[in-house]
Image (cartoon, grey):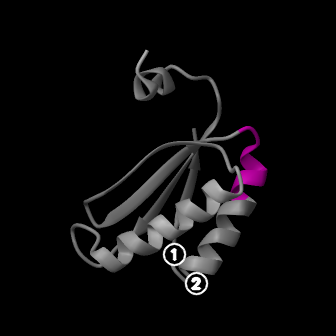
Amino acid sequence: MLGWLKSLFSTTPRVLVSIPVADTFPNKEELDARNAVTDSLDAKGFGKFVGAGGGFNQMDFEYEVADTEVAKQQIAAAMAEHLPGKQYDVKVE
């Protein structure tokens, strides 16, 4: 089964992180910073990367994780390192 299709039916908790951007779509610098956050999380074995995107004045990324509370702490640390002071929202699904 395709990985993305399989992830649609997963019962593993997910975290979705949304980050506001200045324009309708994120620019290269914003995307580079978001990618630095996800690279940092991947390097720590954070969880299973589901996807990332951008548009409608935001950019986002999503992971399947074992522990959502630990995930929120790790996201906060990665955001502070790579996007210090940037506002973001974490949703648990």
Q: What residue is shown at x 56% (from left), y 50% (from top)?
A: 91
Q: Residue furthest front?
A: 43
Q: What residue is shown at x 28% (from left), y 67% (from top)?
A: 57
Closer to us: 83 or 91: 83
Above or below for 53 versus 32: above
The residue wearing badge 2 is 84
Q: Residue furthest left?
A: 24
Q: What residue is shown at x 42% (from left), y 29% (from top)?
A: 4
Check the picture and name the quadrant holding the C terminus.
top right
The disc label shown at residue 16, or none: none
Q: Residue furthest top?
A: 1
User: How far across and how far down the image is residue 49, in percent?
Assistant: 53, 44
The residue wearing badge 1 is 87
Amino acid tagged 2: Pro
Q: Residue furthest bottom?
A: 85
Q: Which residues are magenta?
A: 66-72
Residue 50 sits inside the magenta stretch? no
Check the picture and name the quadrant holding the N terminus.
top left
Q: Is residue 65 left or right of residue 33?
A: right
Instruction: Tell me the quarter of the picture where residue 77 sits.
Output: bottom right
User: How far across and how far down the image is residue 79, in percent?
Assistant: 60, 72
Question: Magenta stretch mostly in which secondary structure?
Answer: helix
User: Do callouts 2 and 1 mark residues in contact (Cβ within 8 Å)?
Assistant: no
